[in-house]
Amino acid sequence: MKKEKVRERIIRVASDLFYRQGYNSTGINQIIAEADIAIGSLYNHFSSKNDLLQAYLIKEENNWFEGFKNTTSKISDPKEKLLALIDYRKKLQQTSKFAGCHFIKIVSEIGDSNPSVSVFSQQHKEKQKNLITALVKEHGMQKQVSDPDLLAENIFLLIEGAVVTSTIRRQYDSFDQVKKIVEGLLP
């Protein structure tokens, strides 16, 4: 197995801590201790905790889209890909034990105090919605979809609602309900 580089280890440890216990509750000293590095190593790679936060968000975004791509790589039908997206989000909730969306969590914790985080998170959600829109439009070329943008917006909101609901209720049934709704919305 390839040895993990120091920068990657710092990001991995910080990502786990930010997600599990929150950004504000995670100190630099804890990251240094859990990554088993010297303080100089941290600052050789990141000039601040905020820089490390940005690296965390980029890593999570890349992981999200790569995971979706891997999950749906053998699916060609756009409707089936949309339904697989719901299953993918459900799987993310299962593997995180209902910890929720990385981006929703960080925005709710940091709020407007860090505009770059808010903007990055908004752009991430916009990319997710654009993915849904592309799949709805592709499906709409095969079937009659009267307003693909509105349909994509509704599907996006349903999925996001399922993530929040499952986080609060600690149950997965909201994804199953959303999947049934989306199957009914797509001709």
Image: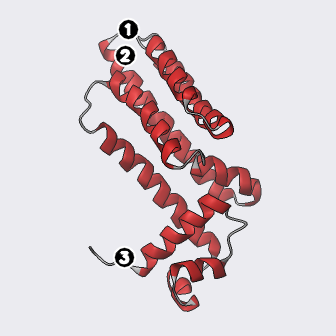
Question: In whole angstroms, how far apart are the C-alphas of marks 3 and 1?
Answer: 50 Å
Q: Amino acid at mark 1?
A: Gln
Identify the secondary structure beneath mark 3.
loop
Most foreground residue, 74 or 138: 74
Total tally of numbered discs in the picture = 3
Report if the CB atoms under discs 3 and 1 are less than 8 Å apart. no
Report if the CB atoms under discs 2 and 1 are less than 8 Å apart. yes
For discs 3 and 1, the disc positioned in front in the rendered view: 3
Identify the secondary structure beneath mark 1.
loop
Q: Is residue 187 left or right of residue 103?
A: left
Read off the residue under disc 1.
144
Q: Is residue 49 left or right of residue 93?
A: right
Task: Residue 75: give x, y in percent of width and height.
Answer: 26, 31
Q: Which mark is residue 4?
A: 3
Read off the residue under disc 2.
140
Residue at 49% x, 56% y is 60
Q: Amino acid at mark 3?
A: Glu
In terms of sequence position, does the residue under pointer 3 or pointer 2 come before the other?
3
Q: Is residue 18 above or below residue 41?
A: above
Residue at 35% x, 29% y is 81
In terms of sequence position, does the residue under pointer 3 or pointer 1 come before the other?
3
* Mark 3 surroundings: few (<14), some (14-19) or many (≥20) residues within 10 A: few
Q: Amino acid at mark 2?
A: Gly
Question: In whole angstroms, how far apart are the C-alphas of marks 3 and 2?
Answer: 44 Å
Task: Residue 15: give x, y in percent of width and height.
Answer: 54, 64
Task: Residue 70: give x, y in percent of width and height.
Answer: 31, 45
Q: Is residue 70 left or right of residue 125?
A: left
Q: Is residue 125 above or below residue 103?
A: above
Most foreground residue, 137 or 41: 41
Identify the secondary structure beneath mark 2.
helix
